[in-house]
Image (spheres, rainbow, N blue to C red):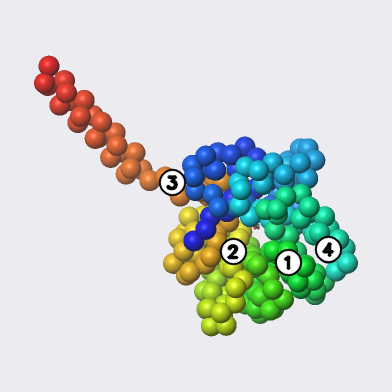
Amino acid sequence: MKLFVDTGNLKEIEAMVSLGIVDGVTTNPSLLAKESGDYREILKQICRTVQGPVSAEVVATDTAGMIREGRDLATIDEHIVIKVPFTKDGVKACKALSSDGHRVNVTLIFSATQAWLAAKVGAAYVSPFVGRLDDVGTTGMNLIREIVEIFDNADYATEVLVASVRNPIHVVESARMGADVVTAPAAVIEQCFKHPLTDIGLERFLKDWEKAQAAKV
Ligand code: G3P
C-alpha cells in the first residue's frame, strides 16, 4: 500500500520524505488555505520535493470551469493529479480530463456507487473519506471494503485512496482491506511510528550494554 501525506505544508512533507516513506501528497483547498504564499509555487515545491503524485483540487463547480482549472493545474508540474469533487459536473470533467491523458482524483466519495461511477469515467484515484463517515456515526472503513471488492470484481484500474484518515487503525485497516493508497496527516504518520515498548526496549538494551562494558574495565 502506498503512503501519501495529506497536507499542504512543505516542512511536514520534507520531514516525511526524508524518512523515505512517502509516495505522494494530497492537498485540498482547506489545507492549502492554511499556507501562506502563492498556491502554485507551493504546489511546485511540493512536487519537486516528493517526486510522486501530488493532488491539487479545482475550486470551480461547473464542468467547463473544472476542466479549465484542471488543465491549468496540470501545467504546474508533471506530478500534478487533478482533484475534482464527486458531482455530476465533476464526473463530466473527470471523463474529459482523463480522455486528455490527465490523472484525476475524484474526491468527496461517501458511497460505493459514487466510487463505481468515478471509476467508469476513468478516474485514476477515488478518495473515500473514512473519518467524516465515522463522524456521522457510520463505520467509514466498511466503505473501503465495498469499493475494493467492486474494483477487484470489475478489474478497474482506478486506485482506492483512503482519505480523511484520523488514526493508525484507519491505516492498518486500509492495508488489510487491500486499499491501494492511504493518505494521512503527518500527525497520524507520527503515531504510526510510536510504541512505548520500543523506547523501553532500546533503553534497556543500551543500559545492559553499558553495565557489561563497565564491568569489564
Ligand atoms: O484528503 C481529504 C482529507 O483532507 C479530509 O480530511 O480530516 O478534513 O476529514 P478531514
- Tell me where residue 106 appears, x and y as whole percent: 70, 67
Q: Nearer the viewer, residue 121 or 177?
A: 121
* Mark number displayed over residue 161: 2
Q: Amino acid at mark 2?
A: Leu
**Alpha-carbon span between mark 3 and mark 2:** 21 Å
Give the mark nearer the N terminus: 3 vs 2: 2
Give the mark nearer the N terminus: 4 vs 2: 4
The answer to which image quadrant residue 176 occupies is: bottom left
The answer to which image quadrant residue 61 occupies is: bottom right
Q: Label 1: which residue? A: 101
**Alpha-carbon span between mark 3 and mark 4:** 38 Å
* Mark number displayed over residue 37: none
Work out whether 69 lies above or below 215. Answer: below
Q: Amino acid at mark 4?
A: Met
In what element is the residue under mark 3?
helix
Q: Residues within 10 Å of mark 1 (few under 14, many from 20)?
A: few
